[in-house]
Image: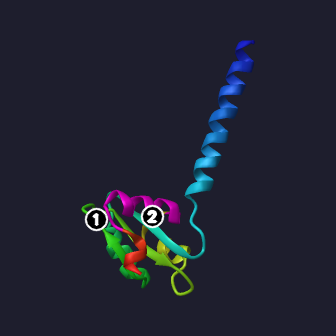
Amino acid sequence: MSRSAKIFATGYFLASCLLMLVGSLMPAREGPVAVFAWPWGESAVSVIARSGGPVLFVGDRSWVALTEAGEQQSIANLYRSGAGFVASSFIAQACARLSGVSLEQLK
């Protein structure tokens, strides 16, 4: 295999992995989401409060919190309120499980 073919294969593999990662982290329109605040900005709880949504869970870290995205609170509203990144419900459930919390008990 030539050097250029190896470079192409490596680049293609990395781009495919990045695309899958981004696709799996994108939140749905409804359900629990993890809100990550900017390191130099306000806390995730402040971002959720400013957007008018409920805070489902806050752990030891102030830069991440869980909220419920629905009709009243859209993902775009969280970004307008200062969220650095809003992750999918899969990530929200993983954050809760790592902290020993069940999202079903919080609802």
Disc number at residue 10?
A: none
Which residues, given as a range, are shown in magenta?
87-101
Q: Position of residue 10 (x, y in %)?
A: 65, 27
Please name the residue shown 60% across and 43% down the image.
Answer: 18
Give yes or no for residue 36 being in the magenta stretch.
no
- Residue neighbourhood size for the residue with mark 1, other residues' Cα within 10 Å, grouped as few (<14), some (14–19), many (≥20): some
- The answer to whether residue 96 is magenta is yes
Q: Is residue 19 left or right of residue 69?
A: right
Q: Amino acid at mark 2?
A: Ala
Residue at the far top: name it: 2
Q: Looking at the picture, does residue 60 appear above or below residue 53?
A: above
* Residue 11 percent location from the top left of the image: 66, 31
Which is the main secondary structure of the residues drawn in magenta? helix
Q: Give the residue displayed 35% in from the left and 69% down from the top.
A: 44
> Does 58 sit left or right of 25 as displayed?
left
Q: Amino acid at mark 1?
A: Gly
* Residue 72 placement, left or right of 107: right
| Position of the C terminus by quadrant | bottom left
The residue where tag 1 is placed is 59
Residue reaching furthest to the left:
60
Disc nearer the start of the sequence (1/2): 1
- What SS does tag 1 mark? loop
Total residue callouts: 2
Residue at image mark 2: 92
Residue 45 occupies quadrant: bottom left
Residue 38 in the figure: left or right of residue 22: left
From the top left corner, tell me how far across and down residue 80 is, in percent: 49, 74
Picture layout, residue 38 above or below residue 14: below
Q: Residue at x 47, y 74 (%)?
A: 78
* Crowd band around label 2 with a 10 angstrom C-alpha radius: few (<14), some (14–19), many (20+): many
- Which residue is more in the foreground, 91 or 35? 91
- Tell me the quarter of the picture where residue 3 sits: top right
